[in-house]
Amino acid sequence: MRIFSAGGLTFDTLIFLDKLPQPIPQTIFAKGSETLIGGTGAGKALALNRLFEQSMFHSMLGNDKSGKNIKSAFKKEKLKFIYDYDSAGTEEHVNLIASDGGRISFYTKYATFDPEFNANKLEHEIKKSDIVVLNIINYCRYLIPFAKKHGKKIWCDIHDYDGKNEYHADFIKNADYIFMSSDSMPDYIEFMRSMIKAGKELVIVTHGKSGASGMDRSGNIVNLPIIDSYKYVNSNGAGDNFFAGFLYGYTKTNDMKKAMQYGTICGGLCISDTGIINGNLSAELIEKEFSKHYSS
């Protein structure tokens, strides 16, 4: 199974706090800080690379210090990474992360909204792949025709879509498998039904500490709680790891509920580490965790 994923790469500074600050002038003593790779594409790609034998990732980055740090980290992970340079440099964030899971993100350096990239190179990689994972970074919408041309299924995470934002329209229309958060959509069940009616294979909605819900082509719904035995350290990357764990489980079992269980494990392992993936993540580890938590 060969996975192609694209879009969503940053270099981040994480600042760990007991609680998020009130909007008043103050001095705050942080619990600690860390600089590391971030971005929804990177979170998925790093996890997928640990779970699949053939996985590659494309994104934009700058010809700068942050870009060099990212390339070095990906090399250590043995992730096949292809990239195009963004003239604006590597996107950078500062994230305040509270002990209760709350987060505030500051975009301190922005990627180019409509960058130049090597389309022929990416079409070649998509053609060779079995599954295409597109993140909702603007340039990724231009990869949709390549996936359609070569008959590849598109997996897409539309994050906290509110049911109205036109930015998401191309991704929603063309995705075969949709993932999202219920944060901005209380009536997510109706949205799931509308997506299945429109021909989607699966719709998966995550609810943070309240678990996840999935709907298949028959309209069957599965609700799954989190595994509360994973010790919370950091929520950064949890949704992306759920996605990667689900994709691993689904390609293995073709069963939505079991795939959600694998996703729940992968997300739980992620929140128990400071990075955007668990440092020990592997197919062997999540199989062991699956036996521990779900095998009867």
Image (cartoon, rainbow, N blue to C red):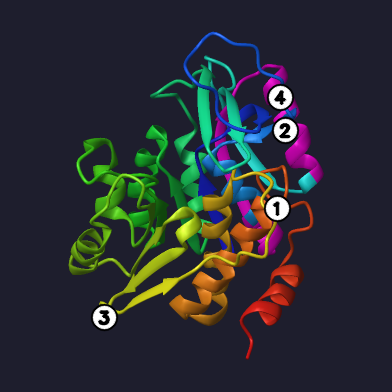
Earlier in the chain: of badge 4 and badge 1, it is: 4
Earlier in the chain: of badge 2 and badge 1, it is: 2
Q: Secondary structure at mark 2?
A: helix
Figure quadrant of residue 206: bottom left
Name the amino acid type tagged 3: Ser
Q: CA distance from mark 4 to mark 1?
A: 19 Å
- Residue appearing at x 76%, y 71% in the figure: 284
Q: Quadrant of the N terminus?
A: bottom right
Total label count? 4
Q: Secondary structure at mark 3?
A: loop
Q: Secondary structure at mark 1?
A: loop
- Residue appearing at x 65%, y 33% in the figure: 18
CB-based contact (under 8 Å), mark 4 and mark 1: no
Write the start and end of the magenta stretch as one range: 48-76
Residue, disc 2: 71
Q: CA distance from mark 2 to mark 1?
A: 25 Å
Q: Quadrant of the C terminus?
A: bottom right
- Residue appearing at x 64%, y 27% in the figure: 11
Residue, disc 3: 218
Name the amino acid type tagged 4: Ala
Relative height, residue 53 to residue 241 (above, below): below
Q: Compare residues 108 and 274 and report the one nearer the observer.
A: 274
Q: Is residue 250 visible?
A: no
Which is closer to the viewer, label 4 or label 3?
4
CB-based contact (under 8 Å), mark 4 and mark 2: no
Q: CA distance from mark 4 to mark 3?
A: 49 Å
Q: Is residue 40 visible?
A: yes
Name the amino acid type tagged 2: Lys
In the rendered structure, the answer to whether residue 292 lies left or right of residue 91 reads: right
